[in-house]
Amino acid sequence: MTIPSLQDGIDKAGSPMNLLWKPNPPLQTVPVVQPEFSGWAKEQVAWQDGVILYDLCHHMNDLFIEGPDAMKLLMSVSANDYEKFAIGQAKQFVPVTRNGDIITDGILMRTGVDSFILSGVPASQTWVRYHADRGGHDVTYRADPDSANRKGGPPAMFRYQVQGPKAMEVVERALGAAPPKVKFFHSEEVTIAGRKLRAFRHGMAGQPGFELLGRWEDNDAVKQALLDAGEPSGIVQVGGLAYYTNGIESGWIPTPTPGIYSDPELEDYRKFVSLFSYEGQKPIHGSFYSDDIEDYYISPYELGYGRSIAFNHDFIGREALEKAKDSVRRTRVTLVYNADDVKEVLGADPGYLLRYPRDRVEVGDEMVGLAMYTANFPQHGTLLSLALVDKRHAEPGTEVAVAWGEHPGAGAPLDAHKAFPRIRATVQSSPYDPYARSGYRA
């Protein structure tokens, strides 16, 4: 039986928006990892004043790329600077279409002269696989999907993050020696519980610490060693609920809409992509609805990836990004919702709340941006969103409003959002957490 492609799904639905618009999608969950260990609200804040353990073994997708043309392939499909890419170093991978719209980001680590691991949302990995196949590159690749989609067997690697003000003391106990002094987004081989692994200076929450990666067969021994080393410091294991909210305070938008659905030149690519992929199934929803999928496309500049873009090589989308770099309209900000409005609209206790919407951000009657990633933070007493807002309204302290609701989509009036309640919000910097904003990359 032939698996339908993304293009098949679009053709059957009649348009990309008919395929992807899905109001009120189910809550996203982390496969295998339990939702809570000590309560999502406690786990949500533990990285700020103590130390946490994130289990990232099961929700990440990995693509292992090897071969003489591996670097050539990656350079051709992404905007990154590869001139001083050391073994053990990683980059925020930035692939774009010929129009300069982001596919989605990822973390690309160089593990050898001709070997790399690309981790994260699978859309960027599909982009690499397609161009590896169509471009005649001398490379091999192997995909390891997340544990919800893997067809039997454990992950290829374990991946744990130890983060927070007490993270380094925990890592030192686990190593039996001082933690390696590596730069941000660099790594070094270390030994824990007699097992060799890689200590990567990186973390999702924007606090000091390491991501520890190694062979799955060493997972049990390494995890237990980390928990034992963390016990004197009060280490908190973070469940799937709290984990999915951490990017808001650290300033990472995880679900940009890939810019692949409308360009006629990408029809062959859409035929390569499965309908049952991230690109075919990830819902678009929220209070902003448009019939035109291109209204949801995003520039990497808007996401804050300008520092990762280099024009010292040819790559797909280079010309578009060169033209766009001085005319970026929107920028990433944090929205802090008015607590009284939240209570009026959502009740006295919203409880656990996580959304990846496309909600209208307004000043008066004018739409000035989109709220992209929203969660409840009891420690702040309100909701926070990561949003893309027109630069003229992006100054911290600016008052805006968010239209709260789910547009029904095609067939309903485009102005159905007018009936939705508005929640006032104040623009603040992104990252919102002061340490993530000022000290994380030091």
Image: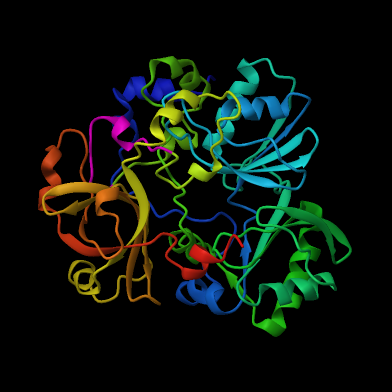
Residue 85 in the image, given as x and y percentages of width and height = 71, 40
Left or right position of 283 against 251: left
The image quadrant of residue 416 is: top left
* Left or right: 154, with 19 as reference point: right
Q: Quadrant of the C terminus?
A: bottom right
Q: Is residue 400 above or below residue 308?
A: below
In this view, the residue in front, 59 or 173, is 173
Foreground of the two, 122 or 263: 263
Q: Residue furthest right?
A: 194
Residue furthest to the bottom: 232
Of residues 350 and 132, which is closer to you in this image? 132
Above-or-below relation of 307 to 140: below
Residue 154 left/right relative to 134:
right
Q: Which segment did they paint magenta?
A: 286-299
Q: Is residue 422 above or below residue 325?
A: below
Quarter of the figure with residue 345 = bottom left
Measuring from the top left, give residue 134's x and y in whole percent.
Answer: 61, 16
**Residue visible at 78% across and 32% down in the picture:** 114
Q: Main secondary structure of the magenta part?
A: loop
Q: Relative to residue 339, is residue 201 drawn left or right?
A: right
Nearest to the observer: residue 118 or residue 440: 440
Q: Is residue 93 magenta?
A: no
Q: Residue at x 58, y 51 (%)?
A: 59
> Would residue 288 be counted in the magenta stretch?
yes
